[in-house]
């Protein structure tokens, strides 16, 4: 899945600061985030770590400091990160019923 920072901010009812056109492809913790990943920071220490990371977008609270990265400001960054994980890693949906073409092998 690919989504722009602007669209993600809209889905999270947040405000984007920075490059809203940045294309995101995954979520990751601060320590493993790449330029196409979303991460989150909820306190001054994690904000400093996130600002120094390779993360493309950081979910932060409204009262977080400004930083050098694209930020999405939200009420609750943990909740927003959980919603973002669900967007990128949605469970597969299977049609109800029984598959009409089962393949069962027989033993000798």
Image (cartoon, rainbow, N blue to C red):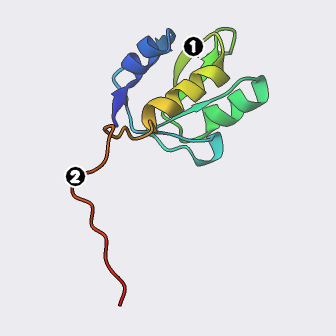
Residue 92, given in percent of the width and then of the height, sits at: 39, 41
Point 67% across, 15% down: residue: 65
SS for callout 1:
strand
Q: Quadrant of residue 63?
A: top right
Residue 54, given in percent of the width and then of the height, sits at: 54, 42
Residue 32, given in percent of the width and then of the height, sits at: 59, 48
Q: Nearer the viewer, residue 11 or 63?
A: 11
User: Which residue lies most toward the bottom here?
Assistant: 108
Q: Quadrant of the C terminus?
A: bottom left
Quote the CA–CA distance across marks 2 and 1.
48 Å
- Is residue 4 visible in the rendered image? The answer is yes
| Contact check, label 2 and label 1, Cβ < 8 Å | no
User: Which numbered mark, 2 or 1, is in the foreground of this view?
Assistant: 2
Q: Quadrant of residue 61?
A: top right
Question: Dot 1 surroundings within 10 Å: few (below 14), some, or many (20 or more)?
Answer: many
Residue under label 2, please give it. 100
Point 37% across, 18% down: residue: 7
Q: Nearer the viewer, residue 49 or 79?
A: 79
Residue 38 appears left or right of 51:
left
Residue under label 1, please give it. 73
Q: Quadrant of the N terminus?
A: top left
Q: Is residue 94 above or below residue 40?
A: below
Q: Nearer the viewer, residue 28 or 102?
A: 102
Residue 8, given in percent of the width and then of the height, sits at: 42, 20
């Amino acid at each position: 899945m690919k989504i722009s920072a602007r669209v993600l901010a809209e889905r999270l009812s947040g405000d984007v600061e920075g490059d809203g056109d940045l294309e995101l492809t995954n979520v990751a913790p601060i320590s493993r985030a790449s330029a196409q990943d979303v991460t989150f920071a909820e306190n001054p220490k994690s904000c400093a770590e996130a600002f120094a990371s390779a993360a493309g977008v950081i979910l932060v609270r409204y009262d977080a400091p400004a930083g050098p990265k694209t930020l999405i400001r939200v009420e609750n960054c943990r909740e927003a990160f959980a919603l973002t994980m669900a967007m990128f890693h949605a469970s597969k949906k299977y049609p109800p019923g029984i598959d009409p073409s089962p393949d069962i092998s027989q033993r000798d």
